[in-house]
Image (cartoon, grey):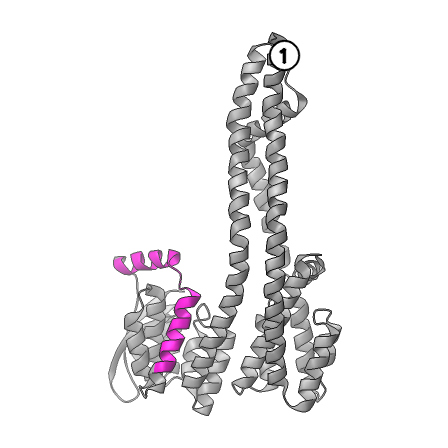
Amino acid sequence: MPRYHYIAIAADGRKVKGAVAAETPYAARKQLRSRSIHPTSVTEASSRAESRATLFSIFARTSKTQIIEFTKQMATLLDSGIKLTEALSVLALQVSEVRFKNALTDIRDRVITGESFTDALKDYSDYFDVIYVSMVRVGEVTGTLEKSLSTIANFMEKRQRVESKVMTAMIYPIILILFCLAAILILTTKVIPTIGEQIERAGQDLPWITSQLMNVGYVLTSWWLLVVIGTVFGIVWGIKRFFRTSRGSYLRDRFILALPLFGPLVKQRVVARFASTLSTLLGSGLAMAESLRVVSEVTGNSLMKRAIQQSRERILAGADIATPLRDSGVIDPAIAHMVAVGEKSGELEKMLKNISNNLEASTDVVIERLSAAIEPLIIIVMAVIIGVIAYATILPILKISAVEF
């Protein structure tokens, strides 16, 4: 979205300067007037230096760690008695990533002109998701913004640790697969074709397996490779487009949950994310119906999203939330029963936190077991493939040696 620099007159008569993100200059002026600011000059930020900075920022995306650190520092500054606008000014000076710095500057300027911190954050969903904005809204309304920010930081750290464990478990298999694919590529495009040409010059027939691997190497080194890559990308693009539809996402998530090895792991992660997020939102003071609405937007699973939306409808109708969760097929009956018990006893937040902790501990065990099982399986499969290629390489050499002998 384009950014516009403006010079304007605030409601109290002060002259103010800043930047705002909008689709058009008219939208920028309209946005400023909605904040009781009367713009006298609105120009698009198109200088060469800013263009280079924006181009660089495409590659230097703001990391989750930077958002967490910003949130922690905001909570500390506010808890120390520093005003919100001053805290934003201090932190904007510390940020090195251009786009995030501009976002913080714009948020500060909007807060100075009387706009709420929550409304200012809404326009920067790339950095502040719906959970973040909802909890900040509760903090602003209740006057405990620093506490809400501290809770957000802890929640984000916990979620990042879980995601990091999964990524760490996948690093070794991915490196192993890439290494084996590189070895296969070299053997099929360099070694086997060279040996095959020498054997054909000697007037010998190539073994079937060697000739087939030579055909593979020919495809990988000719324009047919472009056809194969284009076909693969076309299929992937079509599948991704289908998965963006409600029907496609439902079928995808249902298939993933039905997988024999990864299905239980994904199910545990989805339920743990639901329990952890809902517990955090309820603990921050957000109402149950609003908490369920927020959780449904970030659950990451269409089956779970549908169950949460049904639970929200039941809450608004005065019924329980456990039944739709149990009928979804994602949450086990035992966990749904625990939710029902927590709801009846008035300790749903505590029960959800216990469920989340137990599932995350169980997920760690499942990840370790899968990692221990996948690594030797990958090694065996790659060893068989490379063994076949080595056999196809050595076989014609042995045949020539036998003929000469």
Magenta part, dominant SS? helix
Q: Which sits in the foreground, 211 or 365?
A: 365
Give the residue drawn at x 61%, y 45%.
Answer: 378
Q: Is residue 48 left or right of residue 20?
A: left
Identify the image quadrant of residue 241.
bottom right
Residue 368 inside the magenta-drawn segment: no
Q: Is residue 312 above or below residue 404?
A: below
Residue 134 appears in the rendering: yes
Q: Is residue 92 left or right of residue 330?
A: left
| Percent x, y of residue 361 | 60, 69
Give the residue drawn at x 69%, y 61%.
Answer: 257
Which residue type does callout 1 highlight? Ala
Q: Is residue 397 left or right of residue 344?
A: left
Query: Which image quarter holds the N terminus?
Result: bottom left
| Percent x, y of residue 100 | 36, 68
Give the residue drawn at x 73%, y 69%.
Answer: 329
| Percent x, y of residue 12 | 28, 89
Q: Is residue 10 left or right of residue 116?
A: left
Give the residue drawn at x 26%, y 80%.
Answer: 16
Residue 63 inside the magenta-drawn segment: yes
| Percent x, y of residue 405 | 61, 8
How many C-alpha atoms fall within 10 Å of the one at disc 1: few (<14), some, or many (≥20)? few
Magenta stretch bounds: 49-76
Label 1 sits on residue: 402
Query: As drawn, which residue projects farthest toward the left?
Result: 15
Q: Which sits in the foreground, 347 or 232?
A: 347
Identify the image quadrant of residue 83.
bottom left
Identify the image quadrant of residue 80.
bottom left
Residue 244 appears in the rendering: no
